[in-house]
Image: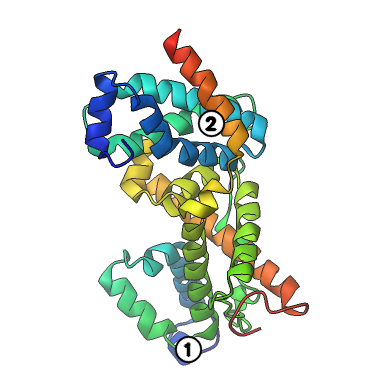
Amino acid sequence: MSENEGLKKLNREERVAFCREVMENLSDLVEGEAPADFCERVDEILGDCQPFNAYRNTLEATIDLAGECGDTEAEFAQVDEDAFLRCVEKVRGKLSS
Amino acid sequence: MAEMTDEELLEAVKRDDPGAFDAFVDRYGRRLMAFGVRMCGHHEDAEDVFQETLLKAYQGLKDLREPKALRTWLYRVAANACRMKRRKEKPSREISLDDFKPAGWDDTMTAEIPDWSALPDDATERAELRTALEEEISQLPPDYRLVLLLRDVEGLSTQETADALQVRVPAVKMRLHRARMALRSQLEAFHAANAGAKPVMGGAA
């Protein structure tokens, strides 16, 4: 994504197409689900690309942070306990009627 | 009953054991309500969705044959309840990857991008960041929010998310990726806005 050594090997159209492909597959790259040959190509072309590395790192951090929102404490902070108990009692009533 | 496995819990429900409902609520209730709150945005709708989910889930548990699929099945019930609640709303808007192209992309001369990936160790700052993320999640279009909540927040696999939402895996992956890109972009803006005031996020400013 920047003017680095790897990207200089590609012409302009190839660069734009390659960067678009990377952009579309960044989640797979971060999660290790991208095909090995694609990963190798990304490392070869964008290994020293600051914007790419920063983009990938911050996407990874975003995913990690979203995962933290699923931790029990963060999850339960979403729940109004009085409302929760009220709902449970309503459902209990419907189930027993 | 709190220590029961899902298999034992299902058996208890099928036998109508005393306390089975409470054990089910204790294990999954708050998580399902939190999911409803995150999907619906406001508490009144979330309470309706939670009640509907709890009622249908508990009634349907007796017919569930595969205990290992319990969590995925519960989220399917919850997602359907959310969809029913939203059925009169406008269709979900689409997120385009073009919205997240770094400046200079077309010239392949992108400027440096701040790397704020070192998240703060301080618990208060970290919680502040999560709160900002929660706010951004609530702003995602519903179809994207559903996928992101199930996959990244609740921790379902891609296949489980597809099963829960009854959509194909490529559709899950596409929505998930765009939702993540949208959140990354918003967190970057949050970082930029806070960088001058205080170092909310770690790493380079």
Residue B104 shown left or right of residue B198 in the figure: left
Please give the chain letter of the residue carrying mark 2.
Answer: B
Instruction: Choose top left, top right, bottom left or bottom right for residue A18.
Output: bottom left
| Mark 1 burial class by Cα count in 10 Å: few <14, some 14-19, many 20+ | few
Q: Are marks 1 and 2 on the same chain?
A: no
Total tally of numbered discs in the picture: 2
| Residue B153 horizontal/vertical position (percent) | 47, 52
Q: Nearer the viewer, residue B72 or B7?
A: B7
Residue found at the far right of this picture: B197
Residue B83 shown left or right of residue B56 in the figure: right
Please give the chain letter of the residue carrying mark 1.
Answer: A
User: The residue under label 1 is which amino acid type?
Assistant: Lys
Residue at image mark 1: A8
| Residue A28 horizontal/vertical position (percent) | 38, 63
**C-alpha span from label 1 to label 2:** 49 Å
| Residue B4 horizontal/vertical position (percent) | 27, 38
- B205 to A66, vertically: above or below: below
| Whether residue B165 can be seen here | no
Quadrant housing the N terminus of chain B: top left
User: The residue under label 2 is which amino acid type?
Assistant: Cys
Quadrant housing the C terminus of chain B: bottom right
Residue at image mark 2: B82
Residue found at the far top of this picture: A97
| Whether residue B61 can be seen here | yes
| Residue B105 horizontal/vertical position (percent) | 60, 74
Q: Is mark 1 on a helix, strand or loop?
A: helix
Q: Is mark 2 on a helix, strand or loop?
A: helix
| Mark 2 burial class by Cα count in 10 Å: few <14, some 14-19, many 20+ | many
